Amino acid sequence: MVEIAILGFGTVGSGVAEVIDRNQKSIRRDFPVGIHVKYILDLRDFPDSPYADRVVHDIHTIIDDPEVEVVCETMGGKHPAYEFSRMALEAGKSVCTSNKELVDAIGGELAVIAKQHNCSYLFEASVGGGIPILRPLRTSFSQEFITDVMGILNGTTNYILTKMEKEGLSFETALRQAQDNGYAEKNPEADIEGYDPCRKIAILASLVTGGNVKFQQVPCEGITKIDTDDFRYAASLHRVVKLLGVCHHDQESDKVYVRTAPYLVPEGHPLYSVSDVYNAVLVHGNMVGDLMFYGSGAGKLPTASAVVSDVIECAWNRGRNVDIGLHNTDADLGDPESVKDVFFVRMDASEKDRAQMLFGGHVQEVKAEGVNGEFAFLTPEMTDREFTEKAAEFETLKKSIRLLQG
Ligand SMILES: NC(=O)c1ccc[n+]([C@@H]2O[C@H](COP(=O)([O-])OP(=O)(O)OC[C@H]3O[C@@H](n4cnc5c(N)ncnc54)[C@H](OP(=O)(O)O)[C@@H]3O)[C@@H](O)[C@H]2O)c1
């Protein structure tokens, strides 16, 4: 039996215990030794829980017990998650986590410590919840040069955008529904401002390039400025608004370009029909082409399932390090302002002539049913820098959204 401990008995942590108990038979089919939860560390006691007798409050109970081989860190936040993870790794115990904030901020350092102590630091659940994406990237793409990884990486914002698109709800009403249904937190900032998907695309970019990309280095735009008229325009372009994390790795220069922003996704694109709380990650390998990974991006049991998949991998690799390809060196980031895109722009109709003049007469006007008094158009393809300079010339510019190339 492999003994494990769970740090943080909240949504994901209690799910880890449940997955292990309910699916012990399936786990033993592949890993006959079996997995057992020996300790649960939390601030609270859980007197009514079947796990009440395993709850401890002192991390040293876990660190000092040589029987504990794997620790699941499902507390979230940076501190004390970092200190506890570090202590476990230094004691030779592998750590499996769902904590994207910690992985993005200090994951490279923890991965190095794991290597030094012949154990592992795995974080499948930190990106895409229940969707297996990090392990396939590590085990199935060695022969590939991955040029692009992009995805819908946040279920809350995808739910809000889907409600706005399909039911014509305002952003505020859709957000309230997401909160009422338990999909959005009371403080939804990390989701709606794009910080959560930004952390996830930073982790994916780090794994694809082998160098560290930090959340703070990635231009990040959320969905708070998206309104229902954007969906009307999008429909007339046979597109839909989606919040995407986008990473392009240029094979010639080896530079990586990363961004989180709303995009207009064309009909027929694999990400077009990913709706509601679902997530999807599209990977393009230079030999294999496009592959898409789709499923539940969050939630107690899907996320816990991903944590337990890491536990089993650590258990299979007792006494040795599983190299996840996260290193403690910086990635070679390209200048995001040099990336070329076509922009969809909305401004007051009074500036139409100036817009046509400034964008060189190559603009393509876009009309939407029921929207009046505006001039909306597509720019020619141009760099972000060129667009920002031109956009600054207008007083009534309401909106610009990038077009995702088909
Ligand atoms: N929920 C999801 O669907 C999901 C999906 C993917 C990733 N994640 C990530 O998984 C992590 C956990 O999320 P969650 O939703 O499970 O959070 P949660 O429900 O708030 O659970 C966290 C648990 O850790 C406990 N805790 C906090 N500080 C502690 C400390 N110093 N010592 C011991 N226990 C402590 C909390 O106790 P108190 O309640 O008393 O503070 C709580 O029981 C986060 O990093 C989150 O981003 C979550």
Image (tube, rainbow, N blue to C red):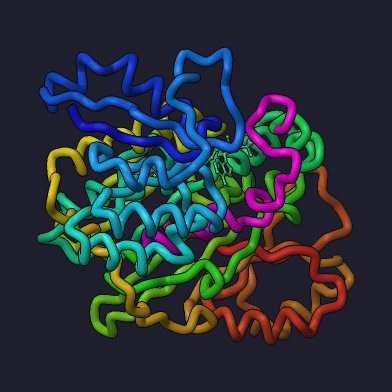
> Percent position (x, y) of residue 103?
43, 58
The answer to whether one can see residue 301 in this image is yes
Residue placed most toward the observer, 244 or 91: 91
**Residue at position x 11%, y 23% in the image:** 32
Quarter of the figure that contains the C terminus: bottom left
Residue 155 located left or right of residue 202: right
Residue 271, image quadrant: top left
Residue placed most toward the observer, 167 or 406: 167
In this view, 293 is above or below 206: above
Q: Residue 211 colored magenta?
A: no
> Percent position (x, y) of residue 191?
63, 49
The answer to whether one can see residue 405 in this image is no
Residue 95 located left or right of residue 66: right
**Residue at position x 24%, y 58% in the image:** 324
> Percent position (x, y) of residue 21?
33, 17
In this view, 306 is above or below 386: above
Quarter of the figure that contains the N terminus: top left
Where does the magenta region start and end?
179-205
Residue 367 located left or right of residue 309: right
Q: Residue 184 colored magenta?
A: yes
Residue 386, image quadrant: bottom right
**Residue at position x 37%, y 41% in the image:** 62
In this view, 252 is above or below 403: below
